[in-house]
């Protein structure tokens, strides 16, 4: 995945929530695109309802998949 592909996921209309799986097995669900900031080589994700955040190097994103509505 490159940053252009990731940016397209964030700006889809309508937005479709997605799940990021990292090479170390961690998983992050993106429900709100305004909490995500793609940078040059990293992705900043603020955790909804918490004061936590994470900075993920784009090279560590193993896969991205849409989250299906229940």
Image (cartoon, rainbow, N blue to C red):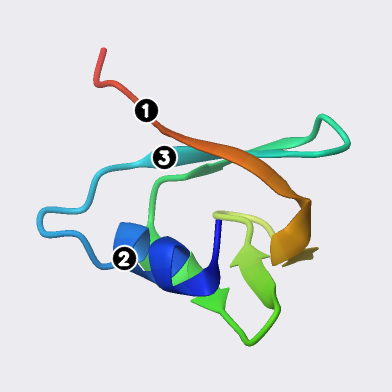
Distance from Cα at disc 1 to Cα at disc 3: 5 Å
Q: Is residue 18 above or below residue 39?
A: above
Q: Position of residue 9 (x, y in %)?
A: 34, 57
Q: Are marks 1 and 3 in contact (CB under 8 Å)?
A: yes
Q: Disc 1 designates what residue?
A: 67
Camera-nearest label, 3 or 2:
2
Figure quadrant of the C terminus = top left
Q: Is residue 32 above or below residue 55?
A: above
Left or right placement of residue 12 versus residue 40 in this view? left
Q: Disc 2 designates what residue?
A: 8
Of callouts 1 and 3, which one flags the residue occurring earlier in the amino acid sequence? 3
Q: Is residue 12 above or below residue 37?
A: above
Neighbourhood count class around disc 1 (C-alpha, 10 Å): few under 14, some 14–19, many 20 upward: few
Left or right placement of residue 2 versus residue 51 in this view? left
Residue at 75 percent across and 60 percent down: it is: 59
Q: Secondary structure at mark 2?
A: helix
The mark tally for this picture is 3
Q: Disc 3 designates what residue?
A: 18
Q: Position of residue 38 (x, y in %)?
A: 54, 77
Q: Position of residue 61 (x, y in %)?
A: 69, 49
């Amino acid at each position: 995945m490159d940053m252009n592909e990731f940016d397209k996921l964030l700006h889809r209309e309508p937005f479709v929530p997605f799940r990021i799986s990292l090479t170390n097995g961690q998983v992050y669900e993106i429900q709100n695109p305004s909490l995500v900031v793609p940078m040059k080589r990293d992705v900043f994700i603020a955790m909804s309802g918490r004061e936590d955040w994470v900075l993920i190097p784009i090279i560590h994103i193993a896969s991205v998949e849409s989250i299906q509505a229940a």
